[in-house]
């Protein structure tokens, strides 16, 4: 667990600030194919995270990830809160079971993806956040160690978000719209992209 507490906090702070700033966009996306609460849900959750960040960041990384996940479960609400929360709690669990960062990044991220899929009873192709998380996991598995890994993750997240537009939702609230869910970016796919981009940009900006 070589990620330093200050680095961890700067990653979480950047992710929180970006997603809070994106709340109007996430709201608009969720108004198109859901109930319009995704922006407010994510904003509320990540404001809670920012409020606790010093306490969370003082813990060992595995416990910090679990605490982040619990905070999101308790504060985001909707479908996305328990899903993002499960992702982070499972990633923390993977670290508790002796996985290391950055060496085991794909396995740690993969544990989070498995948890989302189990909790949501969902698979990629159903127009959800998994349609971004799974392609990014694929990049982490296949491109690990490449000098341009961060750029590849960023591009994969953007392209995967765009690929949700022609999909018909078969999970979550958007599935109620049937074929009318086609033609819009999935809100959770977009929030995943925003979070991942913030992490990538912050890692890249490190001295
Ligand atoms: P709600 O749909 O309860 O209003 P949000 O608006 O906060 O919750 O979040 C909606 C997002 O959650 C969707 O855009 C989708 O990406 C994600 N989502 C919903 N259901 C599932 C699921 N079963 N598996 C994976 N992701 C899901
Ligand atoms: Mg919603």
Image: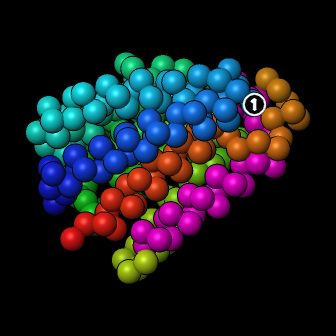
What percent of the width, then of the height, locates residue 190? 59, 45
Span of residues in magenta: 149-175
Label 1 lies in ligand 1 vicinity (Cβ under 8 Å) = no
Q: Main secondary structure of the magenta part?
A: helix
At x 68%, y 35%, the residue is 29
The residue most toward the right is: 179
Is residue 70 shown above or below 9? above
Q: Quadrant of the C terminus?
A: bottom left
- Between 60 and 114, the one lying in front of the other is 60
- Between 206 and 147, the one lying in front of the other is 206
Q: Quadrant of residue 135?
A: bottom right
What percent of the width, then of the height, locates residue 19? 46, 40
At x 54%, y 20%, the residue is 78
Disc 1 is placed on an element classified as: helix
Q: Quadrant of residue 52?
A: top left
Residue 171: say if magenta: yes
Q: Is residue 106 left or right of residue 155?
A: left
Q: Quadrant of the N terminus?
A: bottom left
At x 37%, y 55%, the residue is 199
- The residue at which mark 1 appears reads as 32
- Viewer can see residue 135: no
Is residue 127 shown above or below 98? above
Circle 1 crowding by C-alpha within 10 Å: few under 14, some 14–19, many from 20: some
At x 76%, y 48%, the residue is 165
Q: Quadrant of residue 180?
A: top right
User: What color scheme is it?
Assistant: rainbow
Q: Is residue 83 left or right of residue 49?
A: right
């Amino acid at each position: 667990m070589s990620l330093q507490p200050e680095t961890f906090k700067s990653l979480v702070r950047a992710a929180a600030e970006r997603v809070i700033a994106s709340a109007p966009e996430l709201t608009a996306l969720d108004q198109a194919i859901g109930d319009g609460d995704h922006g407010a849900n994510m904003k509320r959750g990540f404001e809670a995270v920012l409020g606790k960040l010093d306490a969370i960041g003082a813990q060992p990384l595995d416990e910090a990830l679990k605490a982040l996940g619990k905070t999101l479960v308790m504060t985001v609400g909707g479908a996305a809160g328990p899903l993002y929360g499960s992702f982070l709690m499972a990633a923390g669990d993977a670290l508790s079971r002796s996985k290391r960062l950055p060496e085991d990044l794909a396995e740690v991220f993969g544990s989070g993806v498995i948890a989302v899929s189990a909790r949501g009873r969902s698979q990629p192709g159903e127009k959800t956040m998994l349609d971004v998380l799974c392609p990014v996991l694929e990049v982490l598995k296949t491109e690990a160690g490449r000098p341009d890994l961060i750029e590849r993750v960023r591009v994969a997240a953007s392209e995967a978000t765009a690929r949700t537009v022609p999909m018909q939702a078969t999970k979550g609230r958007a599935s109620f719209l049937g074929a009318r869910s086609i033609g819009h970016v999935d809100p959770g796919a977009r929030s995943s992209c925003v979070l991942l981009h913030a992490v990538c940009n912050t890692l890249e900006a490190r001295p």
